[in-house]
Amino acid sequence: MATIITVHGTFAHAGGTAEQPEGEPQGLQWWETGSAFDHDIRTNVEAANGQLDVVPFKWSGDNSELGRRAAGSKLLEQMRGLEARGEPYCVIGHSHGGSVISAALLEGGSRKLTLGNLKRWITVGTPFVKMEKERWLFSRLDLLRKVIFVASMMLFLMFLFYLVAEIFSRQKHMVLGDAAPGVLIFTGLMMSMPIVTSYFVLGYLDSRSMLTHRKVAVERARNAFGARWLSLAHRDDEAIQGLGFLPGAKLSFFDRSFAVSTLTLASVIALPLVYLWVITSPAAMVRIGDWVKEAFYSKRLPAEAAAEIKNIKGLNPSLGPRTDASGAPVARNATRRDYREKRQEIERRFPGAVAIAERESRFVDRFFEINNKPCAGGKLCGGGHDLRINSALLLHVVTDELASAFGTDELGNWRDRLLASLLLPAFLVPVLACLFALVLMLLIRTAAILFSRATSSMLNDLTNTEVKRAAFGNDTEGEIAVGAADRPSWLDQSKPRLPVAVGDLVTNYSNSIASNSLAKFRRAIGTLASVEPKHTADTAIMTYFTWKELVHSSYFDVAEFRKLVAQAISRTDGFRPSAAFQADPNFARTTEWLSTVEAPMPMAAPATSSRRRAA
């Protein structure tokens, strides 16, 4: 009895084959029972004693480092079952199926297992991801352990905060340990115990969980399983080549001005936003009210003029009281003539004084008084919280005060003053608003340029990191994928690539599939628009293209390659080539090919390099 375990790679369930190899049922993949590979292995390989069994090993197939490690643990248990039965077996994995085998053997090394009945493990086109652990322990911990670490540090932080407060207080006497300094030292030691203990315990658990970085586990796996490894990889394998070059790739997603255009659009609504911010800010509105009051009215009138204007204020029909002491309406028409005469007399003596006084009276009456009584604290009525008063104040500033600033108070006729106070703002406010908007636009654009230049490099680095993380399938905590190679990270020597002869057969097959798929797609382009349901990008690709356009996915569709694998297995202990295989014309060729890819593997690598890589 002998067993061959087949381990599929990442996304093994995705895609079909444009052309099935002869004798292979439609839809079956190389590792499944009944496939062409399964048929060829059973035809060309026999167990040295008893029956040959070909067993597919199924796992999630996700591009996930944690998924591959979990599958490795599961595969190791299956291998231990074969060990318990004393049954010889070989394991063959394609793509990251080889990574699953590597994870299983590394875990086996950490458990001091030798797996003596494992006669050979074969990886086909496997890009082994190189991982490095994060430098700091905290960054390597999972969420639960991070919480524990921080919680255990709180007591020490409380003590440290107290020491810092004591130092900066400059007091002669300390609250703790003043009489006996030893108390403070003892307290510090006790406060440090939880974090020190937590650090060493979590550090120990961390070292036990990261098998790839445990020197002992790596050394045991290398010595126990290194010599039994066979790699079958094409020189142009896209997965190995692509992931190998990925760490050096610098993808630029954000140029130095990526945010300028978008952020500058904010200038379109900048003015309304500034207005809304001002009008809803109580502090800003109170300050504006005080500023107008001080800048436009305070001490602008001579004392004598102010006194005389105050005396005639009651005669002004628009400013005086509307009712007398008894509540009866004041006959304003009877006072208008007297008011005009006295007003004209004051104007002759103090030009413009009356207009200023009238505007000040209106201003105070509108914004600082209610029913002739000052508002709270002599401040803006409503304290800046009344949107009605706030909006009226801003409107007053850009009409009355703006017009006054341009000399409308000097106009003799009140009708002229009224007209000027309306027309002038209608012209000036848009002009001033445009100038202010241009300044805001320039400021926003400058800020956008500075922001883009400052963040483009950081965002490119972050995006590159995430792209590479996704490509490597690195979902671990505390480890960084730094590259990929054609050998496991715990081995120091790669195997030779496939011979040119068999490599060309795989290449030619892949090229033929690509040519057929492209022709099929070209013929279908004219009908894509009318297809129901409509094709999305992914369904179009899955419909007209397959994974077989890649060398990486074409190995097992080539009959000669399948026979090369059969040759490799049949030459191990517990297996033998069948009579039919020995009579096959390709038997001699596969023997020659195998001799070129089989290279002796040192049982142990030089101490300096191996330990450095294992660290």
Image (cartoon, helix red, strand yellow):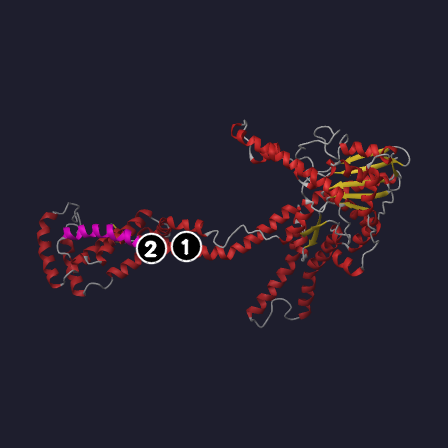
Task: Please rate how many residues cluster around mark 1, counting C-alpha atoms within 10 Å: few if below 14, some from 14 to 19, many from 20.
Answer: some
Q: Main secondary structure of the magenta part?
A: helix
* Quadrant (top left/top right/bottom left/bottom right) for the C terminus: bottom right
Between 71 and 593, the one nearer to me in the picture: 593
| 418 inside magenta stretch | yes
SS type, badge 2: helix
Q: Going by the picture, which residue comes out furthest to the right?
A: 49
Whether tag 2 and tag 1 are in contact, CB under 8 A, the answer is: no
Q: Position of residue 527 (x, y in %)?
A: 54, 29
* Above or below, comparing residue 35 to residue 373 in the picture: above
* Quadrant (top left/top right/bottom left/bottom right) for the N terminus: top right
Q: Position of residue 182 (x, y in %)?
A: 69, 69
- The residue depicted at 47 percent of the width and 53 percent of the height is 257
Q: Which residue is mark 1?
A: 444
* Sequence-first disc among 2 and 1: 2
Q: Is residue 482 left or right of residue 35?
A: left
Quick check: can you spot residue 100?
no
Quick check: can you spot residue 412?
yes
Between 124 and 253, the one nearer to me in the picture: 124
- The residue depicted at 21 percent of the width and 55 percent of the height is 359
Q: Which residue is mark 2?
A: 436
Q: Is residue 330 left or right of residue 489?
A: left
- The residue depicted at 33 percent of the width and 55 percent of the height is 436
Query: Amino acid type of disc 1?
Result: Ile
SS type, badge 1: helix
| 292 inside magenta stretch | no
Q: Position of residue 102 (x, y in %)?
A: 77, 46
Q: Going by the picture, which residue comes out furthest to the bottom?
A: 172
Q: How far is mark 2 from mark 1, CA to CA?
A: 12 Å
Task: Locate residue 411: give its quadrant.
Answer: bottom left
Between 291 and 108, the one nearer to me in the picture: 108
- Where does the magenta region start and end? 414-433
